[in-house]
Image (cartoon, grey):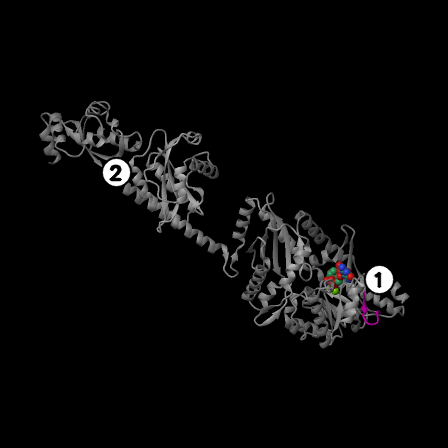
Amino acid sequence: MTPSQFNSFTEKNPLTALISFADLHHTGVIIVNKFSEYLDIEYVNDAFIYETNAHNESFKGQPLHFIYSAYTDKLTIVQLYEQIKNGDPTQAKVYIDCHNSDGYWCELSGHPIKNAANEVQYYLIHTTNITEYMHIHFTAELERVVYKYIEEETAFHTILEVICKKVEHYYFNKIHCAIFLTQNQKNLIAIGNTPEGYSSNLFVDKMTKQLNEHEALHSQYEKACPLNVNTYIPCHSNFCQEINVQGYSPIPLYNEHNDFLGLFYLFFKGQSQLYKNELSFIQIIAPVISFAYKYGEQQQTLRKLAYYDASLDIPNALYFTEQVKERVAEGKSGTFIIIQPGEYSHIVDFYSRSAGDQVLREIVSRLTQSAGEDAYFMGRLSTSAIIIASEESLKPLAHYETTMEHLSLIPYFIKDREVYITLKVGISRFGPGIDVDEGIRYADIGLSKARKENGTSFHVFEESPEDELRLAIDVLSQLTKAITLEQFTPHLQPKIDMTTGEISGFEALARWISPVLGSMSPAVFIPIAEDSGKIREIDQIILKKVLIWMRSRLTNGFKLYPVSVNVSPKHFYYHSFVEEFVGIVKEYEIDASLIIVEVTESAELVDFQKAKEVMTNLKRHGFECSIDDFGVGFSSLSYLQQLPFTEIKIDQSFINLIHNTSMSAVVQTIIHLANSLKMLAVAEGIESMEQYETLKSMGCHAGQGYYFYKPMPLHEVDTLLENI
Ligand code: C2E
Ligand code: MG
Ligand code: MG
């Protein structure tokens, strides 16, 4: 029947005709009087009464809005009334509350019916249960949103929160949703929505308590066996009252392998609860959550990939920091140890980036072997440094020295070459009350300090780094003036011939008494001068003052002894180093053979060709070269013999440990090597008779140290020499 046929059919007695027409239908029909103020219901057919589980007469005379739930979207209702007012056909999706049973989604399609005066007097409204359609539509929409968020790489937590919000909205916020996921099948973690005013953690605590109260549920949860989908648990606890819920339904979540993932919770606000069909619908949503979970897991794997250093197979800086933060949050404390091979950048320049990684990998492997039972966590802090968070408390430095010995005394192999490396180590604490990033910064400052020292060195950084930095800044600001005013003076330390016990020469060591900062140790100002490009000038001032002293001795007819001057590697490679050096010595007319150039055996010497060039050039002018602090730098015995050194100075750290069998073997080897290369072996820092005797018996040629003499000012040297 077309609308016009229908209209002519109803013209005479429209309502009677409409009622007869409605009764013919097996689906719901409502007749509404448009002339009444609130669109009163004139009639509903049996099918509609059956659908809504209502009483026969309950609709008669009620306004139209009586049939649908107050939760129905307000805009939909406004549009529906407008259409009816204009006499237009209507279409609206409303939610219908049923008496004592599931509500349902209903589509209302209204046809205007005219009376004899050609006015629209009635509306014949067909009702269709579209719950299934709405569910499908909602699920599809939810999936679409989840996919979209996944594509946008939204955080897993946010996605679960969105799912909860959407479900809540779909149910007109009558319910509250939360998702709990298991951790190790034991603990719950709350993800997704938590009621307003509740932090996730608080909510988890409360929920866990709830679960414990409901033992049956808890045991089911523990066994991870399926819960009844329609379980409704009434709840009268304070907690439920606090969040204004009457009860809840836990819906289990599984992955595709049927592993239990956690629970999707529906909390029922007020008196309301969802009926069976809604609960089973929500079960359809569960796979969407599981899907998001799977994505979350993948995201975590990806995150791990992104957080791991592929080359060393240890966490990168970001992940390391995050992990330590978690440990500190758990109340753990310990020490940060940053380890950096002193020669890293030179290994990279000389060999390759992968050679640098190879050395770091070897360090990681040696550390892992030596760690034993210690609880520690390792990460790559930067291209050249490894960081350890050890849960051991800060130990005396000797403890770390033993560990680092194991790492540095055994040579590393790079492209079949045996390479000794030094380690620079920065140490600080971590734990509650210390900001993790600050702690790492402290260790980093310790590392910077260690880097300025020769050989393998350690620095514990506990005091305020600001004090240290301030000192560095103060030194830097005074250096220029100190150079202009030539505030640096040489102190000389005698070198002793080990066989005769007589003074065979001196080493010049810079001293600086700053009128502003007081007496400064070379250990402080030399590295700063090196970093700021001022070392060349300091070396030259010391050389000049030594030469003036030698000149005056010569003029006064005193005997001259060879003097070694320290030349920083940075200065040594300066383009006009030899030219300037030769020029200064010539100026004071001192024989080149009386000046020995001491260069620290450092990474810079790796630039083998250049080193050879400079040394050959110096040799041509009659100067001899000594390799300072041997054994702790980038020493490769095979490469040493190709450079024209005439002297090897064995580092003080070796002499300190000469009582140790493995160390004495190393020293003996160096002395043998020096002998076979026709170089002089000089032991640095001899402090005891035992050390002296041992070295003498090993055939060491010369020695320096407090056991003989400390470095002294020039006038004291004169007095000393006078008395010999
Ligand atoms: P270095 O050239 O290896 O000098 C040896 C250091 O050991 C000196 O420290 C000396 O005072 C100290 N020493 C000598 N005998 C003993 C001993 O028996 N026991 C102990 N514990 N120490 C001993 P100093 O004077 O503080 O100099 C430190 C470093 O600063 C030097 O190490 C050198 O690398 C650098 N330096 C000093 N003067 C100059 C300079 O004029 N130019 C450059 N470029 N570097 C310098
Ligand atoms: Mg020296
Ligand atoms: Mg030295």
- In the picture, the disc for residue 496 is none
User: How many labels, in total?
Assistant: 2
Out of 491 and 552, give the one closest to the viewer.
Answer: 491
Q: Residue at x 25, y 41 (%)?
A: 133
Q: Amino acid at mark 1?
A: Leu
Q: Quadrant of ligand 2?
A: bottom right
Image quadrant in which the C terminus is located: bottom right
The kind of secondary structure element at disc 1 is helix
User: Could you tell which of marks 1 and 2 lies nearer the N-terminus?
Assistant: 2
Q: Residue at x 14, y 33 (%)?
A: 25
Q: Residues within 10 Å of mark 1 (few under 14, many from 20)?
A: some
Residue 647 image point, x, y percent:
74, 71
- Please say whether residue 595 is visible from this viewpoint: yes
Residue 219 image point, x, y percent:
40, 41
Residue at numbered disc 1: 714
Out of 157 and 533, give the one closest to the viewer.
Answer: 157
Residue at numbered disc 2: 131
- Magenta segment boundaries in residue numbering: 494-502
- Please say whether residue 509 is visible from this viewpoint: no
Residue 567 image point, x, y percent:
72, 65
